[in-house]
Image (spheres, rainbow, N blue to C red):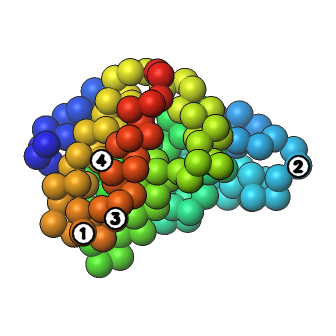
Amino acid sequence: MNTEKLLIEIDKSFPFVKKPQGLELSFHKDDCPHCYYLRNDMEKYSEQIPKDGLRWLHNELSCLSSKGLLWVLPSLLRYCVQANDTYDGLETEFLIYHLSPDLKYQKDAIKQLSLFSKEQVGCLKMFLDWCKNHEHWSEYCCEEISRAIMFLEGVNA
């Protein structure tokens, strides 16, 4: 999968959507301080999330609900592919990690993907295939990419 084709697939599969409001944004509702901070810190953003918002979110992806992840991924996937930042590519690295959950977190990850269509899950697989063939990510996150592809094969969208 080359970059140009992947961006076309991302455009088709992940159009920008309105940000979920309040508790709809976060995975946990009232009793999680991480989710509380996520809701507050993301308050200033609407449909598209700029680089500074994506940088803040890079290690908070597990705090997003399915609707929240559907709001974040249009911006995040485009950024990861277009910026192609391997020197300081935390956003790409942590997205790969997020898509390759350890066994004890797979149930939550499946719940996060529960509103995704087959096309969207397929697009995530294409992103991972792009990472697998990328000169940096294929070496740096080889095991995680393989684990993520296997995980997504088991997701029934």
| Separation (CA) of disc 4 from disc 3 | 10 Å
| Separation (CA) of disc 1 from disc 3 | 6 Å
Estimate the x, y position of residue 151 in percent, counting from the top left.
44, 40
Can residue 79 be spotted in the picture? no
Q: Amino acid at mark 2?
A: Asp
Label 2: which secondary element: loop
Q: Nearer the viewer, residue 120 or 129?
A: 129
| Separation (CA) of disc 2 from disc 4 | 33 Å
Estimate the x, y position of residue 30 in percent, counting from the top left.
87, 44
Q: Quadrant of the N terminus?
A: top left
Marks 2 & 4, CB-CB < 8 Å contact: no
Q: Earlier in the sequence, mark 4 or mark 3?
A: 4
**Residue at 82%, 53% in the rendered image:** 32
Q: Amino acid at mark 1?
A: Glu
User: What residue does disc 2 label?
Assistant: 31
User: What residue does disc 4 label?
Assistant: 128
Q: Amino acid at mark 4?
A: Leu
Q: Nearer the viewer, residue 42 or 77?
A: 77
**Which residue is the extreme one toward the front?**
103
Label 1: which secondary element: helix
| Separation (CA) of disc 1 from disc 2 | 39 Å
Q: Earlier in the sequence, mark 1 or mark 2?
A: 2
Marks 4 & 3, CB-CB < 8 Å contact: no
Label 4: which secondary element: helix
Which label sits in the foreground, 2 or 4?
4
Q: Amino acid at mark 3?
A: Cys
User: What residue does disc 3 label?
Assistant: 141
User: What residue does disc 1 label?
Assistant: 139
Which label sits in the foreground, 1 or 4?
1
**Residue at 64%, 38% in the rendered image:** 107
Q: Earlier in the sequence, mark 1 or mark 4?
A: 4
